[in-house]
Amino acid sequence: MTSKKRLHLHIGTHKTGSTAFQYFMRDHARVLSNAGFSFYEGMKEIENHLELHVAAMRPERMSFSKEKYEIADIESFRHEVANNVSRHYAAHPQSEPIFSAEGLALLRYPDELRTLGQLIEAERFDVRVLLVLRNRQAYLDSMRRQILKVPGRLPSQEPDSHRYVEDDSWLVDYDHIRKLWADEFGPDNLTVIDYDAARAANDGNIIPPMLDAIGAPTNLKNKSRGYRHNVDTRWAKIRRWVAKHKAF
């Protein structure tokens, strides 16, 4: 029997270097392609494939992205997402697809993961899930600061909210997160990285161990060690804006 091609699904969590990883992967898409991978192009944000969790999440539930983009007709949106994913596969038929969206860690229920599986056509692939977890209190503190960055946005006192960041928040129920994804895609297909330990072992850089987890080539890992997120991503944004608007 022919073995299935791998699909790599980086699910976050928030505040664990996801943005740096996403920009790095997009900036090095050609190197990835030459190595047999393809980095999916997001519908709302090129690097962050947030539409996956928005489309998979139960309609009544909320997330930062659902608040930002005010997507009301979820059924139609799911159809758009599924079509976009299919187009990516058609354009890269021989590659191992890579998806990355920290919002996926906000999925809480088995039916949400089943919906996600339908969106990415999981039955076609050997799905490998990458989860990055950090110290619980540091995570909650960082999330609280992130929430407050947006004028008028406050932490919630509703325990089920994605903005509930008290010590007993469901956001740091890591045992539940691990079990949920292991049950859906198999415990051997779930890789968990300790964010704090990984950064300490890599001079503060979380990207190299994430690349190791997906089996990225050595030349790509070497590039990641000198990657400066704040600087490199700014120029990456400019390059993509120029390309999009054909300024030159």
Image (tube, rainbow, N blue to C red):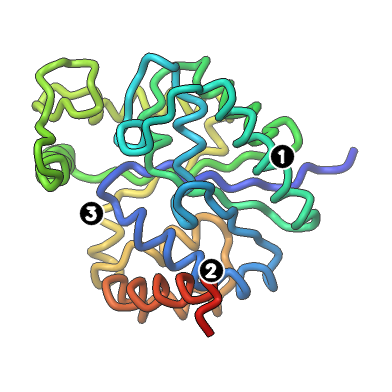
| Marks 1 and 2, the one that precedes in the sequence | 1
Q: Is residue 242 left or right of residue 160?
A: right
Mark 2 falls on what kind of element? helix
Viewer-closest of 235 and 189:
235
Residue wearing tag 2: 244
Q: Is residue 7 left or right of residue 77?
A: right
Image marks 1 and 3: residues in contact by CB distance under 8 Å: no
The 10 Å Cα crowd at callout 1, few under 14, some 14 to 19, many 20 or more, is: some
| Marks 1 and 3, the one that precedes in the sequence | 1
Residue wearing tag 1: 125
Tag nearer the camera, 1 or 2: 2
Mark 1 falls on what kind of element? strand
Point 42% across, 74% down: residue: 236
Image marks 1 and 2: residues in contact by CB distance under 8 Å: no
Please state the horizontal and vertical placement of residue 19, each as a whole percent of the image. Answer: 35, 57
Point 40% across, 70% down: residue: 237
What's the amino acid at mark 1?
Phe
Q: Residues under labels 1 and 3: Cα distance? A: 31 Å
What's the amino acid at mark 2?
Lys
Please state the horizontal and vertical placement of residue 64, each as a whole percent of the image. Answer: 30, 35
Which mark is drawn over residue 196? Answer: 3
Point 24% across, 16% down: residue: 160
Please state the horizontal and vertical placement of residue 59, each as a whole percent of the image. Answer: 43, 17
What's the amino acid at mark 3?
Asp
Please state the horizontal and vertical placement of residue 134, each as a whole percent of the image. Answer: 24, 45
Residue lying furthest bottom: 248
Residue 216 to residue 100: above or below: below
Mark 3 falls on what kind of element? helix
Residue 132 to residue 186: above or below: below
